[in-house]
Amino acid sequence: MTSINRYFIGLLLISVQLFAQKAAFDIVPLGVKGGIDEKNLSAYLVAPINTHDYICLDAGTINAGIEKAISNKVFNVSTSEVLRKYIKGYFISHAHLDHVSGLIINSPADSSKTVYATKKCMEMMENHYFNGETWANFGDEGPGFQLKKYHFQTLNFGEETKIKNTTMTAKAFPLSHVNPFESTAFLIQNGNNAILYLGDTGPDSIEKNNNLSELWKAVAPLIQSKKLNGIFIEVSFPNEQPDNLLFGHLTSNHLMVELHKLEELAGKGTLKNFKIIITHLKPPSQNIVKIKEQLQKGNDLGVELIFPEQGKRFTL
């Protein structure tokens, strides 16, 4: 082999490597915490990179998160324009208030778009929030006078759904959040790239089901083919939290047990440097510090742990 051939082969290998590492999604966290901070509750904007075609994964905090992102120069338009024009739809993992309060409160100022949720979650939102009594019914289904600003679209588990006004698709998977209460994971795909977002979930061992195991089976092939760019998953409590007081959440140790199950399915070493985005850390601040320390110490798989900050953009 001549030196010229070696040179071009080297360039080709470098190009392939760079292409494989190229980010595919813009992520803007509007809220990252669980618990009592009403200005910073679970909500993540996700768009194909270099576009403003965002969806919002959960909607605990909207307005305060947009304002934070604007102050960090993520957006150079008004809060109203981000809300009305940039956000194309909402995906709600479950109907607990810390995951929907931003959607409810901001609905009068919002534009027409689609709210996506599973049947049980949608029924809870229609019956308890958008019902014409607790709050005006801004949807096109449910009790009370329907203002029809939002289209309420019910998702079927395992069925791929095109996301309106974007190039992305979504697939919903069941999670358990204090069995039998249902939560949801969303697999968001754009072309050959995907991310996985999990709403609140307890470990299979405590929830007494196999929802996480079945989810890992579904996404393991995407990890093997390097099409899954990252997983958003909660860790609400430090390891000191007793199992009987988890209330459908994960600790650092429980997360690592679940990730080991995923690696067994995807293949040894497949999670090394794989991005795990930690969500829903519950105050107080000393608990959050402890969770981060425990995750770093227990990270024997070599995953890349990402702790998102409100209003600070990153890519996957």
Image (spheres, rainbow, N blue to C red):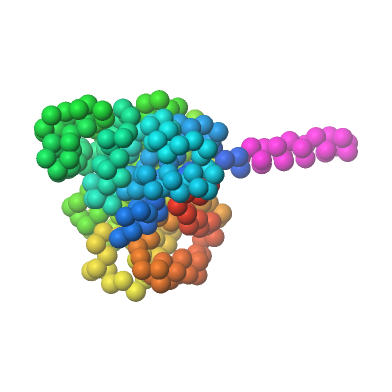
In the image, what residue occupies the spot 24% across and 62% down? 247
Side of 4 relative to 273 (left or right): right
In the image, what residue occupies the spot 30% across and 40% down? 106
Side of 41 relative to 129 (left or right): right
In the image, what residue occupies the spot 45% across and 49% down? 68
Image x and y of residue 171, in percent? 35, 36
Magenta part mainly helix, strand or loop? helix
Tell whether position 5 is magenta: yes
Which of these two is toward me, 65 or 307? 65
The residues colored magenta run: 1-20
Image x and y of residue 249, in percent? 30, 60
Image x and y of residue 153, in percent? 26, 30
Place residue 257 in its image quadrant.
Answer: bottom left
Tell whether position 114 is magenta: no
Whether residue 277 can be seen here: no
Q: How many numbered marks, from 0 up?
A: 0
The quadrant in which the N terminus is found is: top right
Whether residue 251 can be seen here: yes
Side of 64 relative to 147 (left or right): right
In this view, 91 is above or below 60: above
Place residue 141 in its image quadrant.
Answer: top left
Side of 63 relative to 135 (left or right): right
Place residue 83 in its image quadrant.
Answer: top left
In the image, what residue occupies the spot 37% across and 26% down? 164
> Residue pushed farthest bottom?
240
In this view, 251 is above or below 72: below
